[in-house]
Image (tube, rainbow, N blue to C red):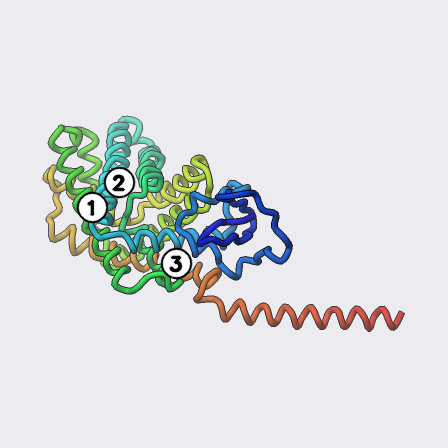
Amino acid sequence: AAQSCSGYSFVQPMRVAVPATAKKSYTLSMISDGSDRSERKSLDISKTTYTALVKSPKDAYLAFAEKGMSNAKMHWFKILHQSILGGAYVGFGGLLALSVAGNISGIGFTNPGLVKMTFAALFPVNLLLIVMTGGQLFTGNSATVSAAKFEKMIYWRELYKSFGVSLIGNVIGCGLFALTANYVGLLKGGTGALACSTAVAKCAGTFGQTVVKAILCNWMVSLAVFMAGASNDLVGKLVGCWFPISTFVAIGLEHSVANLFIMPCAILLGAKVTIADVVYKNLIPVIIGNAIAGAFVVAGSYSYQFGRLGKKSRDRFSEQLKTYEIRKRSENKEYVSFE
């Protein structure tokens, strides 16, 4: 299959290009094993028609890094704009989950798992909105932009710009959405009670516990972004987003952007937490943990597997494989000669 970029055509597994001019025939000499990484040469992947519903893991990683490069190279004001929208979409998902899960207290008292399951089933709508509209979250950028840096697609200043501006935009978007929800009276009753109890519980852990919960959380979130990018249709993106996000929510892990919505809601409602508690006991350790998971657990590990970080290991493996195949052929020839 092929992808068109920069005036050339590269054949890639599972892809078929849509030529701009007359239809061409391809020869065996044009077939790529993926080592030329032609996907990195064009961000306009809309020009590619896939013959499979899901990319291979290596193709998915390259698209993941390309997404990070695209995000990092945006003008800072566009990053801020998309991040504010991303924060608002997290607010929509959070408010939906709070509104439904917080108002099933009757059966929730005797079945606490039902409240968790309801919250976890509804919250992931926010990531689908973000993925399908190009919104940006600090948590996702910590993985995609880091992958772009590992692949030498961006400069350090672009990584810092992406991380900093997206976090500021998420703070603005989530904060404004919390103010709006409170102003119009959507945080009353069980909705507000669940927001307050959740905020108090999130500030009760030690610094180390919160960091580890944040690492585990953004591991799942980054894989959700990875799998959504690996899919080439809406249903696949929905499934890719839904299950990892539901997993971290049901377990009770820590997501910095989700907390940027829940914590302001709780403070506005008079919960027994202070701004200092929120910042020092939750947001700082959660941001640190989320960044570690995105940059190293996900981006770093898959760069080692499919990208630049693991090139030497893959080269050594290729040499060992060639040596093994030569030895096996030699042994087979000796066996045939003996017969």
Q: Is residue 201 visible?
A: no
Kindly report the distance in space between the C-alpha atoms of the residues bearing marks 1 and 3.
Answer: 24 Å
Report the residue marked by disc 1: 260
Task: Say if mark 1 contacts mark 2, CB within 8 Å.
Answer: yes
Which numbered disc covers residue 280? Answer: none
Horizontal arrangement in the rendering, residue 275 relative to residue 160 (left or right): left
For mark 1, give the secondary structure. Answer: helix
Please tell me which of labels 1 and 3 falls first in the chain: 1
Which numbered disc covers residue 299? Answer: 3
Report the residue marked by disc 2: 90
Mark 3: amino acid: Ala
For mark 3, give the secondary structure. Answer: helix
Q: Is residue 320 above or below residue 3?
A: below
Q: Position of residue 89 (x, y in %)?
A: 26, 38
How dense is the environment of label 1, judged by Cα within 10 Å: few (below 14), some, or many (20 and up)?
many
Please tell me which of labels 2 and 3 falls first in the chain: 2
Mark 1: amino acid: Leu
The answer to which image quadrant residue 96 occupies is top left
